[in-house]
Amino acid sequence: MRIGVISDVHGNYEALTAVLREIDKEGVDLIVNSGDNIGYSAFPNECVSILSERNVASVMGNYDDAGSMRRSSPCTPKSHATFRGDSGCGTGDEETNRIRFASLRWTQERISEETSEYLSSLPVTYGFRTGNGKTLMFHGGPENLTQWITADDYDLLASIAERNDAKLVIMGHTHKPFSRQIKGTLFVNPGAVGRPFDGDPRASFAIIDAERDLRVSFRRVGYDVEKNIRALVDAGLPPEIGIMLRNGRDSHIA
């Protein structure tokens, strides 16, 4: 079995379609997505529609959770909807918070009912089996959407391996690709499709060969970054997001 692995699309239609074109060339048997489909770019509904139509197996990210519109009843008008105040990512400096909150509110006000229902229905964890055994997928941590786990967190990764009896664990949230084998479990973060943080603005994804031995290959694909930036600025999102996308960083400081 060959698995295409994506994460952190963040409403970036240009990046998502570029990645899916590359994955389609690989002849994969399954595409999985470790969450955060919306936020920061101008096409949340379009990205979710593609993922839904293609039956991509997905889990909920913190932006999927926070971005979904919460209404007191189906009859409540959109102008009176109750929104989550933040994405649960913690706090940064005042300017970073302004960009984050503006992006989240923009997204909350514009996602469709269909998108909201799709995001709200996503599971926190998703499990499936390959010829190698159990695979577990989540966004941040297995019990916490916003848990920040990197390749250097040996003790935490070892604890997850011991508690879940999985040969493969797929995760997202940090927007940086990594793989690490710990206690018989291969941990894979494919990096971000729509908003990389590792200094490379190209969209990131992974291909996992699970036919016999688990083998992971990280891939990057260029896309029209400037087209995506023009669209988000024209849509009224903070223009500082464009600097983040050009630099492949979680910072608007050029």
Image (cartoon, helix red, strand yellow):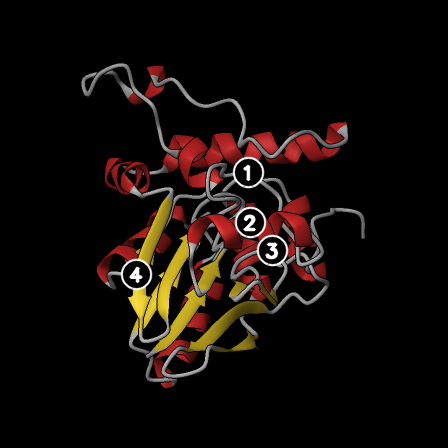
Which marked residue is nearer to the observer: mark 3 or mark 4? 4
* Cα distance between the residues tagged 2 and 4: 20 Å
Res 128 label: 4
Quadrant where the image shows the N terminus: bottom left
| Residue farthest to the right, as pictured | 254
Q: Which residue is mark 3?
A: 175
Closer to the chain start, of discs 1 and 3, is 1
195 is higher (above) or lower (below) than 234: below
Which marked residue is nearer to the observer: mark 4 or mark 1? 4
Inspect the image, locate mark 3, and give the three-letter code of the amino acid beneath it. Answer: His
Inspect the image, locate mark 2, and give the three-letter code of the amino acid beneath it. Answer: His
Which marked residue is nearer to the observer: mark 1 or mark 3? 1
* Cα distance between the residues tagged 4 and 1: 23 Å
Find out whether the residues at labels 2 and 3 contact each other: C-beta distance under 8 Å: yes
Q: Which residue is mark 1?
A: 146
Q: Please state if 133 lies on the left or on the right of 175 as rendered.
A: left
Q: Which residue is mark 2?
A: 173
* Cα distance between the residues tagged 1 and 3: 12 Å
